[in-house]
Image (cartoon, helix red, strand yellow):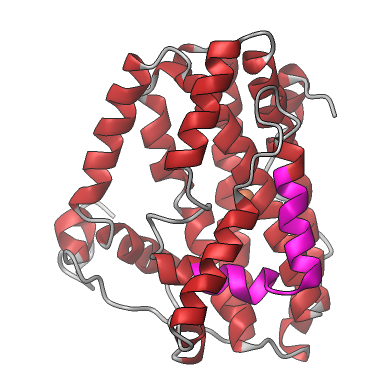
Amino acid sequence: MSFSIERYKEESRKLDTAGIDWQSVTANPLSKGDLFCLHYMMDIENHVPLYLSHLLVTRACMDPILTAFLACWNYEELWHGENIGKFLNLYGIEFDTQDRIANVRANLGFQNSVSLLSTMVGSWLLKDFSAVYLTIGAINELATLTGYGALIRKSGHPVLKDLLGRIIKDERRHFAFYFNSAKEWLTDNEKAQRVDRWMLDRVWVPVGQGVKTQEQVDALALYLFDDEQGEEELLGIDEKIGRLPGLANIKLMSRALYAARERRRQNLAWAFRLIENEEWAIAPPTKSPIGELTTRRTHAGVAIEGT
Ligand SMILES: [Fe+2]
Ligand SMILES: [Fe+2]
């Protein structure tokens, strides 16, 4: 698995959706679990620009190769969210994408600013911050594409399979960048290896956690991976990440699945009640009204001056 930043810059483009049979989206039904996962995935894809804001203030972004990657990556991820939203709209779930994104952001609250500041300060205090960030990037991209693969399998929906199959190709390139960059940083660097492992064992959380609650993360994990094949796939992610220098036998994704199972064992309604109760539906923000954060939406329905 190789990665060339020059080639990536040349070839990066918005998701090619030519030939997707959008007219047939309603021809096959989706379960509540499928819909829950699609909303979760769309929200997290659409969260990338805010995640990027956390990265650009770190020491890691002094590296021009990384910022070149992030410039292209951010654009590609935008179109993943857009197209999952389009798919859901065509399936008959009505929502305004901008409102949905604003809702998710309004729910982040003060914690988002604290997290941004602590990541920034931490990165400047920790010389090997990049090793940790790049490894987390590799896990997140691999987990994302594995999740899309699992949803293709669970849903059996041909149009969704086509769309997610195309998105997976992008995610593979993202994974290749992060994995190779992490490997480069960690090779012959024992101190970075120790820091990386220590941090991953303590601060790593599955992709989406923070934007989504623990129970929502568990609902996705248990819906997609709580069977033999799913567990094997998560162990496969751990095994791949364990090939990075200093990370042999690390257990992250499988540990998260076992923890989710344990929480459900203690409370049988855990996680699946969210799927049953249609948790994915648009919920008004609980922490602050959208208008306070996005002034353009302060007066709904009023035309913005100059437009
Ligand atoms: Fe993506
Ligand atoms: Fe990605």
Q: Residue furthest top?
A: 188
Residue 70 shown left or right of residue 202 in the figure: right
Q: Quadrant of residue 13?
A: top right
Q: Quadrant of residue 124?
A: top left
Give, as a single range, the part of the protein colored magenta.
Answer: 218-238
Please tell me which residue lies in front, 187 or 14.
Answer: 187
Residue 294: horizontal and vertical position, in percent? 22, 55
Going 44% across and 40% down the picture, which residue do you hit?
A: 202
Going 55% across and 49% down the picture, which residue do you hit?
A: 78
Please tell me which residue lies in front, 300 or 115.
Answer: 115
**Is residue 133 visible to the viewer in this orientation of the structure?**
no
Q: Is 235 a magenta residue?
A: yes
Provide the major secondary structure of the magenta segment. Answer: helix
**Is residue 4 visible to the viewer in this orientation of the structure?**
yes
* Rendered view: 117 above or below 302: above
Residue 303: horizontal and vertical position, in percent? 23, 64
The number of numbered discs placed on residues in the rendered structure image is: 0
Going 41% across and 65% down the picture, which residue do you hit?
A: 214
In the rendered image, the quadrant that contains the N terminus is: top right
Q: Is 177 a magenta residue?
A: no
Going 77% across and 89% down the picture, which residue do you hit?
A: 28
Please tell me which residue lies in front, 97 or 122.
Answer: 122
Residue 279: horizontal and vertical position, in percent? 43, 82
In the rendered image, the quadrant that contains the C terminus is: bottom left
